[in-house]
């Protein structure tokens, strides 16, 4: 309209200054009540985790740091420790054949027992996950050995594997098989310990049963429509869907395999078996620390074992991206 006042266009310089001032303006201060609530929430959190935190610091972190410091000393647990630098580690790798023997036996035990435990647990889980009469009873029977204390289980197996009056050799004799001496034979003592570890696969089996029961039935139905056999359904659907549990069982089983102690100690009466045939790393650490009173050398052995376990665990963690499948994961 003629005569109406026209509005002047905004000055771009003033507009830029206002935007810059707004961007540089401080954030609104947090209200005192909200600040107190956050502080109270943080204090509650630390109060709840304080028992675990205290136990971790006093029973795990400080002992680990102490053992690391002791690994550079010569200490018999009675006299003050003497600093010797890396001599314990040098002796361990260059002048201790028992260490390499114990490492070889430990690797043999872990390399056989862990894969067999995974296969047996997966096979039992695939059978017991199906709806069947008496399934709860059989699951209970499978799980009971997992809750039996290791010392009690080792005592039971020591009786079962007795060379003369043991039930295992008696059962083999019924088929005309002369059973071995088991714990008294250098060739059979580690297989006997492996049998004990396989007897206690119940915990891993129960986890796999729960994982298999969580697989959507629509996947099996679609596979049946496409003509997939039972084995193909198991290999292409069941196994990939339970790989997170298999991964968990593999890592925990590997750590337990490298730290085997109670079974060896009880089955061999605290010895290393015939001709050191059952000598493993943790019993060897125990012997050096509490029988030979060489706590510094035992600490060095413990840290080498720690690094070995960490190395194998890192390899498994690294390889998990190739074979572990998660439901929320999408792969090209």
Image (cartoon, rainbow, N blue to C red):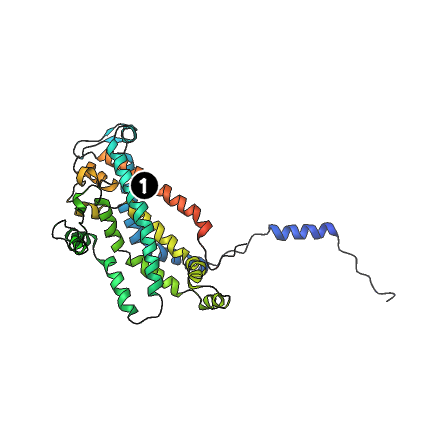
Above/below status of 219 relative to 91: below
Residue 88 % position (x, y): 27, 30
Q: From where the camera sits, is residue 168 visible?
A: yes
Secondary structure at badge 1 equals helix
In-front residue for pair 314/194: 194
Q: Nearer the viewer, residue 247 or 11?
A: 247
Residue at coordinates 61% horizontally, 51% vertically from top-left? 23
> To which quarter of the image does residue 201 belong?
bottom left
**Would residue 251 be found to the left or right of residue 225 on screen?**
left
- Residue drawn where x is 22% and y is 45% of the image: 188
Quadrant including the C terminus: bottom right
Task: Tell me residue 313's x, y (percent).
Answer: 37, 45
Residue occupying the point 69% across, 50% down: 16
Position in image of residue 147 (x %, y %): 23, 58
Name the quadrant of the N terminus.
Answer: bottom right
- Would you name the residue on which mark 1 appears? 306
Crowdedness near tag 1: few (<14), some (14–19) or many (≥20) residues, C-alpha within 10 Å:
some
Which residue, as the protein is rendered here, is positioned at the far bottom? 133
Judged left or right of residue 71, residue 79 is left
Q: Residue furthest left?
A: 165
């Amino acid at each position: 309209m003629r005569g109406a006042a026209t509005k002047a266009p905004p000055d771009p310089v003033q507009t830029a200054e206002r935007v810059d001032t707004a961007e540089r303006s401080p954030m609104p201060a947090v209200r005192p009540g909200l600040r107190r609530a956050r502080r109270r929430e943080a204090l509650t959190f630390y109060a709840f985790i304080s028992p675990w935190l205290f136990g971790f610091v006093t029973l795990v972190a400080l002992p680990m740091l102490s053992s690391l410091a002791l690994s550079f000393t010569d200490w018999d647990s009675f006299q003050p420790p003497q600093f010797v630098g890396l001599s314990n580690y040098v002796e361990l790798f260059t002048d201790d054949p028992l260490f390499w023997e114990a490492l070889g036996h430990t690797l043999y035990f872990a390399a056989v027992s862990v894969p067999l435990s995974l296969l047996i647990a997966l096979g039992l889980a695939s059978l017991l996950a199906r709806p069947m009469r008496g399934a709860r009873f059989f699951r209970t029977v499978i799980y009971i050995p997992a809750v039996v204390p290791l010392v009690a289980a080792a005592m039971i197996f020591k009786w079962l594997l007795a060379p003369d009056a043991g039930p295992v050799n008696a059962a083999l004799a019924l088929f005309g098989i002369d059973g071995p001496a088991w714990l008294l034979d250098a060739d059979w003592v580690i297989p006997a310990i492996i049998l004990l570890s396989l007897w206690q696969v119940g915990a891993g089996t129960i986890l796999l049963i729960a994982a298999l029961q969580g697989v959507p039935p629509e996947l099996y139905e679609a596979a049946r429509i496409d003509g997939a056999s039972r084995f193909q359904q198991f290999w292409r659907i069941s196994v990939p869907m339970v790989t997170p549990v298999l991964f968990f069982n593999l890592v925990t089983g590997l750590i337990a395999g490298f730290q085997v102690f109670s079974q060896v100690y009880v089955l061999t009466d605290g010895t290393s078996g015939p001709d050191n045939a059952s000598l493993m790393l943790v019993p060897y650490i125990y012997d050096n620390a509490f029988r030979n009173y060489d706590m510094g050398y035992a600490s060095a052995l413990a840290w080498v074992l720690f690094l070995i376990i960490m190395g194998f665990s890192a390899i498994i963690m690294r390889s998990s991206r190739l074979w572990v499948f998660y439901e929320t994961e999408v792969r090209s």
